[in-house]
Image (tube, rainbow, N blue to C red):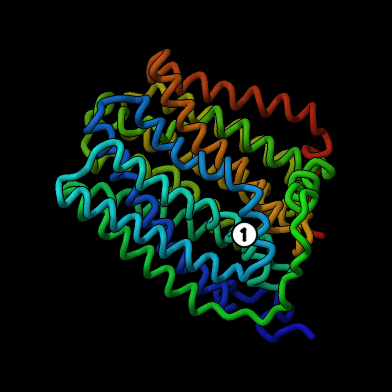
Amino acid sequence: MVPQSLSPTPRLSLLHHRPFALFWIARVATTMAFHIQGVGVGWQIYELTGSAFFLGLVGLTQFLPICFLTLVVGQVVDRYDRRLIGLLCQIVEGLAAGALAYVSFSGLQSKESILAIFLVAGTARTFELPTMQALVPGLVPAQDIPRAIAGAASANRTATIVGPALGGLLYVGGPTAAYGTASVLFLAASLFFALIRLDRPPLKREPVTLQSLLAGFGYIRSHPLVLGAVTLDLFATLLGGATALLPIYARDLLGTGPWGLGLLRSAPAVGALATSLTLARYPLRHRVGKTMFGAIVAFGVATMVFAVSRSFALSLGALSVLGSADVVNVVIRSSLVQIETPDEMRGRVSAVNSLFIGTSNYLGEFESGLTATLFGVVPAVLIGGAGTIVVAVIWVRLFPALAQVDSLER
């Protein structure tokens, strides 16, 4: 028997599904908190060190937990209550943000203490992201999964507009204000997770074996569409990420303060929000494979424009286009992965997918910091943008079936 809240209602607004509405609000709060914290950490680390390399280390502290805990995370997400896991992650991240506020207020801040606390937050986020990906399909009817993924993306993008801008304004009053606000938002998100109720059968708990631990990797490897989608995002974003270098652009190349950094970090979400809201209302119907590859190329071009811009307005525009292209890729890729994966495998597949996402995002930040140290900031971003375009061309030839995917409907 299908629960009433999950009965087929294709055109019902996503927010009429109470579990999804609570999830959406929680994601807005969490993502705002994450970006407020990110602005604070980026500016504070650059103030303390003046080093692009240490900005890259911020990304590395987020990548290491993903790298070492992926297999464990997949098992946990497939064996235990995903709602409870999400709740606990928000609490840990809230406490970590509170610790950042404390060391800043007490004058105990150092690059080592900030990176250590951020590592703890990154560990919680390692569990959080696969949990969120695996949880979304259970919040709405099956036919609404692509819309729900786009709707969840709109939550992230909404918060990514407000969060960094608010973080930059709060940081003007000191890092304690920024981190304290982030802590409150994380803890508020945990309350919304506590209110989510799902009437779903219990997850199967198969014995933990080496085979079950590696099942996520095995599933992705045996399904070319999923393999092509996640590896395309891995290599394209790994090369194209310039987020770690935004404090340098804001202060040294564009001549702004923390408020400017906040606006630069918000800019990708402006384009992404408009695009994700459009996709939630008008899902992509045809030629989704070609659209995804086109979005990757647009991402690379926008990155290169940003690299050479010395106009604050042009930089904001380029980052907005970059965010719009990125959300098209995210919605198509995430929909393909979730639709092609059975529910009992979603935790492990989502954990591996998060490993690839974390590698591209966080290791990409470390790569950007290292490349900028070796070649300079502008060449590093230019190389990354060009590399993204090259990856898209190569993947069209390696995974032709992915480029020929016409529809996300199953």
Residue pictured at 67% horizontal, 29% vertical: 392
Q: Residues within 10 Å of mark 1 (few under 14, many from 20)?
A: many
Say what amino acid the circle numbered 1 marks.
Ile
Is residue 22 rendered to the left or right of residue 404? left
Is label 1 in a helix, a strand or a loop?
Answer: helix
* Number of residue marks: 1
**Residue 166 vertical position relative to residue 39 in the rendered view, above or below:** below
Residue 269 lies, in percent from the top left, at 44, 48
Task: Give percent across and percent down for residue 275.
Answer: 54, 51
Residue 14 placement, left or right of 221: left
Check the picture and name the quadrant holding the N terminus. bottom right
Q: Quadrant of the C terminus?
A: bottom right
Residue indicated by mark 1: 149
Q: Nearer the viewer, residue 164 or 190?
A: 190
Q: Which residue is drawn at 22% across and 34% down?
A: 256
| Depth check, front residue: 91 or 273 | 91
Residue 406 visible within the image: no
The part of the image, by quadrant, that contains residue 338 is bottom right
Identify which residue, 3 or 359, lies in the foreground. 359
In the rendered image, the vertical position of residue 3 relative to residue 365, given as above or below: below
The answer to whether residue 238 is above or below residue 202 is above
